[in-house]
Image (spheres, helix red, strand yellow):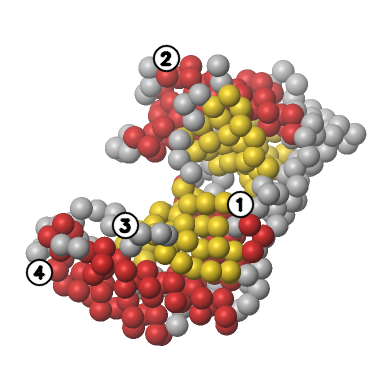
Amino acid sequence: MVKIATQTINGKAFEYALLNEFLERLKPFTSVSVIENEPYKTALKCFVSFEEKEQGHYKLVASFAVNFLLDIEPRLANGISNQDILQLEIVADKAGQTGDVRDVLAIRSMQKWEIGISAKNNHRAVKHSRLSNDIDFGKKWLGFPCSLEYFQEIKPVFDHLANLRTASKATQKWDTLGDYHTSVYVPILDAFKKELLHLENKNPGIVAENLIKYLIGNQDFYKVIKGKNKVEIQAYNLHGTLNLPFENIKPKAKIQRLKLPNRLIEVVYQDNSKTTILVTLSEGWQISFRIHNASSRIEPSLKFDINLVSAPHSLFSNQLFIG
């Protein structure tokens, strides 16, 4: 198996634990099949790489999450007939690039129904997007290209980094630059901030909504966050496809639709920070963008750690504590 980072192994093991728990819980009631694709095989390998005790913990957390999801998604356990097979699948990572953040899918083709789960192991970041000379974040994230002024503003900074990298044959490290937060991060963040507001002014009512759709995905999904002794389940019900009844069987809890924002309210630096920008949108959304260098060696691109700071009150969230 290709060497995988620890965080990825943990995440993949949790994906397998969730899928397997769905299978075990549902097969007595309904026809279930598992698509044993490459992502499934990778997740299984990650899961079995743990000691039995650790596997048991993954299974326990997954069982809490699955029990809860069965209560609020009656279609998981209920088919129209024996031919109405529930297919369980682990999704390839590249789906995330097209705006689909779901890791595990449960699909009923006969009912033209599916739900997806984004499985997170102890972390809440929503995206890790990059900025560089040739990345048009406006076009990629929001559907509107960045201005020429934006590229002119960031070019000298990234060109300088590219020259340093070339001159040192890719060996020079960031810490040789002294206070690079001020010399590199701040001008890039200033340009980013200015451009985001410029795009909002040019396309009022659309940029804020598209930003959220880019960050949390264009499909409805449940986010299941595994903690040490708890599991949190959040429902991103943007299009109203979650929490549907099956015939006369209703879900045991009601999940509201999430309101998307229609404007950017402000874009400011976090207090006393040269690395993090806070973007506040209407409807109670707030996002933080923390910029950082992905490698210890200088390269002409930077990475964002993007987190949801606050979501609307309509975001359904439930924490289950595990004894």
Q: Which residue is mark 1?
A: 311
Q: How far apart are labels 3 and 4 at the CA level? A: 22 Å
Q: Residue lying farthest front? A: 272
From this view, report whether residue 136 is shown above or below residue 310.
below
Q: Tell me the SS state at disc 2.
A: helix
- Of the residues under marks 1 and 4, which one precedes in the sequence? 4
Taking the spot 41% from the left edge, 32% from the top edge, the residue there is 10
| Residue lying at the far right of the rendered structure | 248
Q: Quadrant of residue 298?
A: bottom left
Look at the image and tell me whether residue 95 can be seen.
no
Element on which disc 4 rests: helix
* Residue 117 position within the rendered picture, expressed as x and y whole percent measured from the top left: 59, 40
Mark found first going from the N terminus, 2 or 1: 2
Tell which circle, 2 or 4, labels the residue nearer the N-terminal end. Answer: 2
Is tag 3's residue or tag 2's residue first in the polypeptide sequence?
2
Q: Position of residue 239 (x, y in %)?
A: 72, 54
**Foreground pick, 236 / 311:** 311
Q: Nearer the viewer, mark 3 or mark 4?
A: 3
The answer to whether residue 86 of the structure is visible from this angle is yes
Residue bearing mark 4: 167
Amino acid type at image mark 4: Ala
Name the residue at 32% across, 69% down.
186
Amino acid carrying label 3: it is His
Amino acid bearing label 2: Glu
Given residues 212 and 74, the one toward you in this image is 212
In the image, which is nearer the foreground, mark 1 or mark 4?
1
How many angstroms separate mark 2 from mark 4 (CA)? 50 Å
Q: Where does label 2 land, which residue? A: 52
**Badge 1 amino acid:** Ala
CA–CA distance between discs 1 and 3? 24 Å
